[in-house]
Image (cartoon, grey):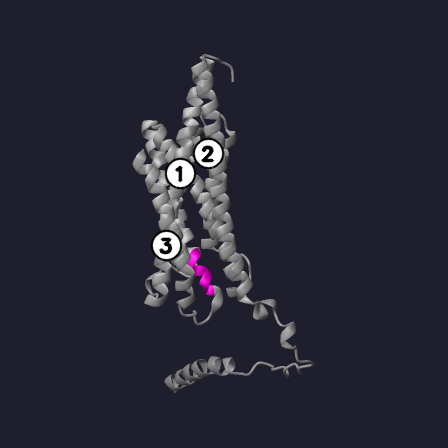
Amino acid sequence: MKSFGFCVLLFVAGITPPMLAQQPAASQPPTPTNEFVPLSEAAPREVLPATPLVFYAYGFVWVALLGYVFTIWRRMARVERDLADVQRRLKDGGGGR
Amino acid sequence: MQNRSILVPVLLCAAAVMFFRAPFMIDAAPYESTMGLIQRIFYFHVPSAMVMFLSALVCGVASAVYLAKRSPHADAVAVSAAEMVVVFGLIVLVTGPLWARKAWGVWWQWDARLTSALVLWLIFVSYLLLRRFAGAGSEMVAAAVGVFGMANVPFVYWSVNVWRTIHPNTNVVASLIPEMRVPLYWGTAAFLLLYIALLLTRMRLEASRMQLEAAYAEIED
């Protein structure tokens, strides 16, 4: 009798928590759709065209590289002009910066 | 010296031919299934990033040599390479957000890859600022910054595999089909040739500048 009571207790303990867990939560009715959003008002990324972005990316690569080449050329021209000037002054025996 | 003066135009011509051919190869490559046209930025974005990493490594090694031997030639290589990191890094940091805007819906995400790449770029910007404004003796401090910047490269590269990020990981390149892989490697080779030509030209500028400083010193003596 004592073991029967223990088995009943085990059964109840084993079955009750899963049953309780399976109880459906107090469900709320789904919110009705009040309006349809047209595609033109969707999130910007959905309608963002890729072509200008690709164009800007490739354009920037060329602008950056050509700009950098231009700065090297300009700096080189300035340094070589200064160098020629200083070497001429050294040849003339002059001083001062 | 004569070889170097011929080498730079040859490299530039080869790079120009490759860059002229590149758009046709990129156009022939298939669209990526989820990103479509915007994924084409990949063919210039990734080569720029590779050249940025390479340049950071060149700067770091040259800086280490300068710290060990005080070689002016190593210093010229380091400062030239640091400038290249900033230029190619700027290309990476501009083309990346243009791609992300369409692919992810945002210009920027503070994730591991993007943030670490920005930090790497800022380290080399600080290198150049040190060289420009820190005055005499800044070469030593800048060289230490260059070595630190080089040490940062593996973290940036592996960040996409180690941390959670929305940036594509390093397996993407290995998994490319030949129609996508060939334009990528072609673009990488073109960027590499251009990089070598620019580095040699920039080193020549640095050599001229050192010569000018020596000439000024001679006048003052």
Tell me the kind of residue under disc 1. Answer: Thr
Front-most of residues B137 and A32: B137
The residues bearing labels 1 and 2 have C-alpha atoms spaced at a distance of 9 Å
Q: Disc 1 is attached to a residue of which chain?
A: B
Q: Which element is circle 1 on?
A: helix
Magenta span of residues: B39-44
Q: How many marks?
A: 3
Image location of residue A41, percent across then percent down: 65, 72
State whether residue A38 appears in this view. Answer: yes
- Magenta residues: mostly which secondary structure? helix
Residue at image mark 1: B201
Could you confirm whether marks 2 and 3 are on the same chain? no
State whether residue B167 appears in this view. Answer: no
The residues bearing labels 1 and 3 have C-alpha atoms spaced at a distance of 20 Å
Which dot marks residue B188? Answer: 3
Image location of residue B110, percent across then percent down: 51, 54
Q: Residue at x 40, y 40 (%)?
A: B81
Tell me the kind of residue under disc 3. Answer: Thr
Query: Label 1: few (<14), some or many (≥20) within 10 Å?
Result: many
**Image vertical order of residue B172 relative to residue B110, above or below:** below
Horizontal side of residue B195 vs B109, given as left or right: left
Q: Which element is circle 3 on?
A: helix
The residue furthest right is A34
Marks 1 & 2, CB-CB < 8 Å contact: yes
**Image vertical order of residue B208 relative to residue B124, above or below:** above
Q: Which element is circle 2 on?
A: helix
Query: Label 2: few (<14), some or many (≥20) within 10 Å?
Result: some
Which dot marks residue A76? Answer: 2
